[in-house]
Image (spheres, rainbow, N blue to C red):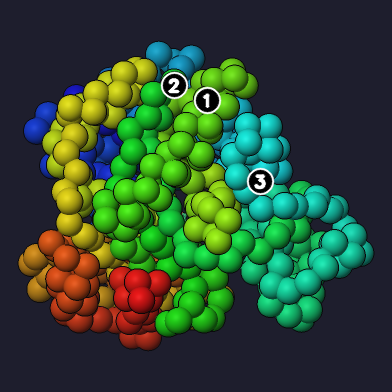
Amino acid sequence: MKILIVGKGGREHALARALSDSPSSPELFACPGSEGMSALATPVTDIPNPAALTVWMKQQGIDLCVAGEEAWLALGLADECEKAGIPCFGPFQEAAQLESSKIYAKEFMTRHNVPTGGFEVVDNAADCRAAVKSYPTVLKYNGLAAGKGVAVCTTEAEMEEFVKMVFEDKQFGEDRVFVEEFLDGKEVSVICAVAGDDYQYFTPARDYKRLKENDLGPNTGGMGAVASRRLLDPEMAERIEKTIIQPTVDGLKKDNLRYCGFLYWGIILTKEGPKVLEFNCRFGDPEAQAVLPLVEGDFAEFLFQAAQGKLNAGLLKFHEGWSITLVMASKDYPAKGGSGDVISGLDDVKEGRVYHAGTRLNDEGAFETNGGRILTVSRTGNTREEARDAAYAELKKISFDGAQIRTDIGTLHFE
Ligand code: GLY
């Protein structure tokens, strides 16, 4: 079986590893992929859009396309695959609006009684200021913004900074903003493989979005994640399934939104119960790097069948233990990415899994930094402490100039 993964980051590297570990031994390609994952998946570069990609897939006899990044889905990757008759695990453009349009997602949740925070939509700076009644408040840019379109503002100055970025500097484009009720509580990321009205619950995870320990500093694409079946107690897992997952999957059907792909619910465990913060129409990053090492079985065959509408749960097994993923970011992240700092110690990591996110090979054949989040290190263990100690022990072997890490992944929010 030939599989193409679409994307280039740590999540796609983790998908490549899980697919390549599958007993069905697929041949893997990644568009654009990266030098860091090229040993598993041959990079496919210079493809401008989904239509051109399906032409390439047909020429190569690709059997399955697995969407990693949301941007290609929002451009109609799955729709183009369907036209070309190529199974795709990733939703159609219409359903991908659950991620690409936050207003669309909120209206979907309201229509289908999926619990979420209250909100108001605004399209200019003055209305935005007027809609903020208290702090903290959450401001969200409606369109895609590469993980930077959400601000949790605790002061007026922070609100003004976001307003300037969106309405004056127009950093993300011309879309609207919504002002959302701040949901207080621990966060959990739930990911399911969805095919029609069936779904397969993967291991829940917790992502650490702030740059610094104790959830301080700016928001990032995620500085680490922890995953385990034991992250949620059985009552809460059942409540989430009953009040959030099932109504969402039923809602897709009621709205005639054909959905085939990973669906991600960002959930806050508030005092009133679990509420949805956001949907993503793909696996999370860095959640994938924590969750996928806990998946055993034939992941490739599972996705191949799922892309054709059949969820064969018997093909997968989920490790009952814990997994921790630690992110190493470049020195000026998230303000800007770094480049050209040589990364040492990669070959010393024997037990953990290193997933490349922002690396490249230099002229001497060594990996160097080339982005904001550079790489992730993942380890599993029977307990959270075991996984955590093992992950930090492996991480210590890797270094590059100015590397930023968090030291409380898997500890904070477990007090
Ligand atoms: N970890 C959050 C995301 O993937 O969007």
Name the residue that disc number 2 marks: 197
Q: Is residue 349 above or below residue 25?
A: below
Q: Answer yes or no: do the residues labelled 1 and 2 have beta carbons within 8 Å?
A: yes
Q: Would residue 224 appear left or right of 271 to someone viewing this image?
A: left
Quarter residue 408 falls in: bottom left
Q: Amino acid at mark 1?
A: Asp
Residue at mark 1 to residue at mark 2: CA–CA distance = 7 Å
Kindly identify the residue that appears in the image at 48 percent across and 14 percent down.
Answer: 83
Quarter residue 354 falls in: bottom left
Residue 155, given in percent of the width and then of the height, sits at 73, 80
Secondary structure under the numbered disc 2 in the rendered image = loop
Image disc number at residue 102: 3
Residue 392, given in percent of the width and then of the height, sits at 21, 77
Residue 6, given in percent of the width and then of the height, sits at 39, 40
Q: Amino acid at mark 3?
A: Lys
- Front position in the image: 37 or 305: 305
Image disc number at residue 250: 1
Of marks 3 and 1, the one in the foreground: 1
Q: Residues within 10 Å of mark 1 (few under 14, many from 20)?
A: some
Secondary structure under the numbered disc 3 in the rendered image = helix
Q: Is residue 217 visible?
A: yes
Q: Amino acid at mark 2?
A: Asp
Q: Earlier in the sequence, mark 1 or mark 2?
A: 2
Q: Is residue 322 above or below residue 397?
A: above
Q: Would residue 344 appear left or right of 348 to someone viewing this image?
A: right
- Give the quarter of the figure containing the N terminus: top left
Report if the beta carbon of the residue with label 1 is closer than 8 angstroms to ligand 1: no
Image disc number at residue 183: none
Residue at mark 3 to residue at mark 2: CA–CA distance = 23 Å
- Give the quarter of the figure containing the C terminus: bottom left
Q: Is residue 54 visible?
A: no
Kindly identify the residue that appears in the image at 22 percent across and 32 percent down.
Answer: 300
